[in-house]
Amino acid sequence: MANYASAVVSYADALNAVTFPNVPRNKIVDQVFDTSPFYALLRGAKHIREVRGGLFHQRTINVGKSPNFVWYAGSGGWKMQTFEGLIAFGWDWKFAHDGVVISGDQIIKNEYSDDAIVDLIQGKIDIAEMTGPDQMAQDLYRNVPGGTNTDGTAGNPNAWEGLAVQVDNGTISATVGQQSRTTYSILNSKVNYNSAIGAGMMAALQALWLAANRGGLSRTKLNLVTEAIYGSMWGQLQTPERYTIDPARLEALGIKTTGGNDLGFNDSVILLDEKVPTGVQKPVQAGGSGGYWYGLNTDFFELAVHPDRFYSIGEWFKDPDGDSYFIDIYFAGALIGLRPNRQFVAWMSGG
């Protein structure tokens, strides 16, 4: 145990011994965590879906057209054939845990003390509650379960399918929602993994945007980019072009003030998200150094969560072998992307 009382020998003078420092009570200023606009959006009312139970999350989709349509005259005279055309996406429940451990002597010295600057237990719980979403937001982009993440690290099979899987054309992940992109090429997103920041990026992005929005009743609403890509985009616009998004659009989208700004592309907001992979090799580990631009139609994303495990705090338990106490924080859910072919992604050298 630390000898806290020894601190008195380092007091500078009598004033030090008779005067408390000016410390605001119950206030901790965060220096670590960056909000992810995309994860903040998913946790909003428009995209979150509470689900109790179920073996896994399944969504039925169509992957083909009827072969029996014909124009005819008179009494017709056609032959019809059976067809399937329907398959199912599937996502397993994903579980996450964090927790706080505190010793008995810390509780005695801090809890309910008039001399406590901050409630130590609550402060540690607050940090743990922010750590989970922070890590999950990172995996929201990069994770390739059972494969190689977009930042070169090993994919975590216990974590959810990130955008690296859900917005791809088979280069990074041959499957999405358990279905083969080789068998069903319609599940491929629009991609350009050979782009670069600078003068040519606008034409490359426009080609992706057109491909992803062709024939759709809704279109790209959100662009998520790295700092370098955002800066390059900003530098290519004239001053009047840099203020194109009405702040009310952000509220309508569900983002409100979280990471909001005025830069847009084809009437869809561009947000800088620190969790977007940057300084990483071209897929798949093909050299270079760059970052990603994700163009998302958010109408087709859901965050399925169990209401009893949505960053839920458990009960305090005592360590049977010592004077320590711990509490658990749980998450259970899945990221569900329903229309990969309405999304686009670019890897940009220098991004």
Image (spheres, grey):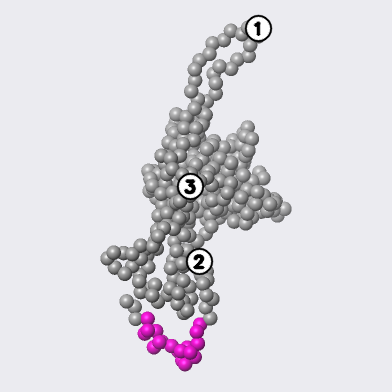
In depth, the one of 81 and 173 nearer the eye is 81
The amino acid type of the residue labelled 1 equals: Gly
Secondary structure beneath dot 3 equals strand
In depth, the one of 189 and 228 nearer the eye is 189
In depth, the one of 130 and 269 nearer the eye is 130
Distance in Å between CA atoms under marks 3 and 1: 55 Å
Q: Residues within 10 Å of mark 2 (few under 14, many from 20)?
A: few
Q: Residue at x 42, y 46 (%)?
A: 94
Asked if residue 205 lies in the magenta stretch, the reply is: no
Distance in Å between CA atoms under marks 1 and 2: 77 Å
List the residue tagged with mark 2.
Answer: 31
List the residue tagged with mark 3.
Answer: 305
N-terminal of the pair, mark 3 or mark 1, is 1
The reply to whether discs 2 and 3 touch (Cβ–Cβ < 8 Å) is: no
Q: Residues within 10 Å of mark 3 (few under 14, many from 20)?
A: many
Question: From which residue to which does the magenta span run?
Answer: 4-21
Q: Which residue is drawn at 46% across and 89% down?
A: 17
Q: In this view, does 38 lie to the left or right of 218?
A: left
In depth, the one of 101 and 132 nearer the eye is 101
Identify whether 24 is placed above or below 278.
below
Q: Residue at x 55, y 21 (%)?
A: 66
List the residue tagged with mark 1.
Answer: 74
Distance in Å between CA atoms under marks 2 and 3: 29 Å
The reply to whether discs 3 and 1 touch (Cβ–Cβ < 8 Å) is: no
Which dot marks residue 240? none
The amino acid type of the residue labelled 3 equals: Val
Q: Position of residue 188 (x, y in %)?
A: 50, 35
